Image (cartoon, rainbow, N blue to C red):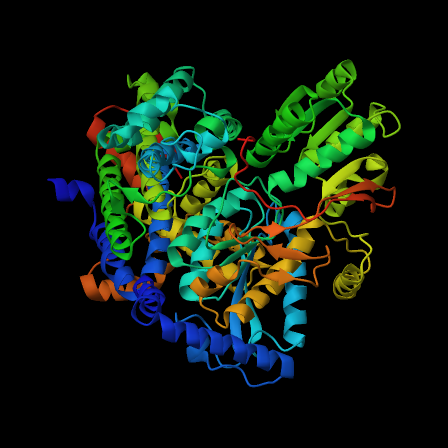
Amino acid sequence: MLFKTLFKSRAEFLSYAALTLLLVVVLPVLLPVFRLNLFGKYLTYGFVGVGLVLLWGRCGILSLGQGVFFGIGGYCMAMFLKLEASDPITTKIQSTPGIPDFMDWNQLTHLPFFWEPFKHFPVALLAVVLVPTALAFCLGWAMFQRRVGGVYFAIITQAIALIISLGIDGNQGYTGGRNGITDLRTLLGWDIRSTSAQYILYFACVFFLLLCGLAAKYIINTRMGRVLVAIRDREDRVRFSGYDVALCRTFVFALAALISGVGGAFFVLQVGFMSPSLIGIVPSIEMVIFTAVGGRLSVVGAILGSLIVNLGKTTFSEAIPELWLFLMGGTFIAVVMFFPNGVAGLMEPGGWLSTKLEPFKAMLFGRSGPGSGAGNEVVEVVKNTSVSIAQTTEVTK
Amino acid sequence: MKMLSSCISGLAPAVAKPAAATLRRGFLTAMVGLAASLHATAAPPTAEVNTTGLSITDTTVTVGQLHSATGTMAISETGSIQAEQLAIDQINAAGGVLGRQIKVIKEDGASDWPTFAEKAKKLLVKDKVAAVFGCWTSASRKAVLPVFEKENGMLYYPTFYEGLEESKNVIYTGQEATQQIIAGLDWIAKEKGAKTFYLIGSDYIWPRTSAKIARKHIENVLKGTVVGEEFYALGHTQFGSLINKIKLKKPDVIYGIVVGGSNVSFYKQLKAAGITSDKQTVLTISVTEDEVLGIGGENLAGFYSSMKYFQSLDNPNNTAFVKAFKEKYGEKSVIGDVTQAGYLGPWLWKATVEKAGSFDVDKIAAASSGVEFKGAPEGYVRIHDKNHHLWSKTRIGQWNLDGQAKVLFESGLIEPDPFPKGYQ
């Protein structure tokens, strides 16, 4: 039964329902459209967070280059929007009307071949989904086949983030360079900067984010998810049991890239431009931080993390423009020291919040919530995969 | 809703009763002139000077300041932040704008372009500021430009930049590329008989566009040759192979468009390789007093910069400006070209508001044409009748060991030409 698979416990269902309520009802009702648009922007990072829950939290692969996939998704969308905004009439002041303005500034006289497909919306949509996935699949396959993992993998992903952001920076005639692709106005003639468009885009973003969240939960709670956890905790034994570890890892890496790419596309639609400053090492690490703050084991946590950290950024920097970075830094240190499992960890059984709430829970439900810790999962791996890796339980925390 | 109301307020007088509007405008301007000349404290009523719901009361007007206070650009943007604040303080001390004291809301763009866009929107939509002084890099300006056009705000942008842009919602108080480049090249060709040039820049839009304009001018007008043109990623620090090429090609002039941290390495390595001012002419458009602080006067001594402003300019306006700046920010502070251009922003805005007799953005945008500021430290500036850039002079300064420049040449007022024909 799908529902049972998605939500293994009442607590899981309630937290997801609460998140849905917050995003779909509470925020749109409480916030003016300008703030709501900002929250829409924060949520696009939540896509990357959901990907990281699968990749890092479940499968133990720390990627410090998720900004690349977010960025590629964003660029695919931005290229389409830019071509739409560069019709020959609005660009008649240029030497070559009909091409994007930054190409004209760089003496290009015709559209580069790889821009041509982005004249068509369906192609652009497909590219948003397929290009990051394909890139991640190739990279992942190349690395995981050679059993590159752990710190080495993290370093390589960082290098890729650097290479791609430098590549975009250095080819400004083709990519817009450091300025990025700016001044995006319409999507198929629909003004994406209008108030109604910002509401619609926000809800679309929330819809796809929650959908991606459910997909991630589905994977986590089925056999695949348990294999991922087993790979995280004892790779060799999973391999000896006949599983193709490299394939599993490549799959989850590609899936995380796909989800991040969708986030990037929504970023462009809601913010109105794309820039290489979202692809490099710093934003990629920031996205890992969002996930860590929210809780890398939990989908709801990762989404909340991207909301909390970015809201903190906005609030602190509006209140104290000179010192806000110190406040942010202090918050991160506090999270690492006091809540190593992030915000979601507070609510888990044994967490700070749940111990406080235990008496109320008992009162409400007549029993304490079922556990969902790592130990339980490994036990279920054993049950469900009918492979004898029972000793794995010994090595889990 | 805001757009709608501004539309109506913009259209209604023009369509329905042009005569009455002209009369009222004339009356208002007269009244403002009268008020200013009498130093009267009575300000025109808010309802008249603010028809679009900006954050203006009978005694105050709120403006925004949007620069990077943190991140890699903070070191460059601090001067602009300080100069804009100084101008605002001085305007307030002199009675404010239309009898209203200026309140500033500061926002941090954090050297991050999406953040610039977010903060610009916040200043315009939530705070409803009457004007924004800010941005530094081209990338940050490109990021906020659609926001200013959509929300109908007014931006005063201080940096010299590549041109190729013009907006109703932006006043460019720095020079566009042709103003800065052409007079400098003419001077060096005439004074030094320079025929061969080596162009070296950082790899982004401003150096690329500047090099393009310089090359066209060198080849088509000066009949010289460009013997080398190279661009390096921002932050690049190894110029060894470049210096070897320079030694091989022996250009009359090295034309430097390198920015940021790369600047420091570039000039230090030039000196280490023995390329000093007694053997080689170096002309740069990317070194101001601020950069010299980091590079060190000894690495630049004898090289030339082409700028519209140097701290050492000898005129009463500048003497007063430098004195006030040092009093406020310390004896050791230096003032570069962009800092001075930042100082112009609030003053030009004040002059424009008083000319328009209104804080309404549409009226300011229209009234900007021809607005003068005679108290400018760089001498005299005037906003162009058509393109929202400034008429300004270009100077050649030669750097001394102490990090100050000796001004050797001063052009006449140069017309801003953001879309130069023959240079595209």
Asked whether A14 or A129 is in front, the reply is A129
Quarter of the N terminus of chain A within the rendering: top left
Q: Is residue B291 left or right of residue A77?
A: right
Question: Residue A26: x percent and y percent?
Answer: 26, 62
Dividing the picture into quadrants, the one containing residue A133 is: top left
Q: Quadrant of residue A100?
A: top left
Tell me what residue is drawn at x 46 percent, y 44 percent.
Answer: A289
The percent position of residue A61, horizontal first and vertical second, equals 41, 30
Q: Is residue B392 left or right of residue A74?
A: right
Q: Is residue B102 above or below residue A50?
A: below
Q: Residue at x 73, y 33 (%)?
A: B186
- Coordinates of residue A48 in the picture (x, y in percent): 36, 39
Q: Is residue A144 left or right of residue B34?
A: left
The front one of A159 and A84 is: A84
Q: Residue at x 55, y 47 (%)?
A: B111
Q: Is residue A310 visible?
A: yes
The image shows a total of numbered marks equal to: 0
Residue A168 against residue B383 in the figure, above or below: above
Residue drawn where x is 30% and y is 35% of the image: A378
Where is residue A22? Give x, y as percent. 27, 58
- Residue A369: in sight, yes or no? no
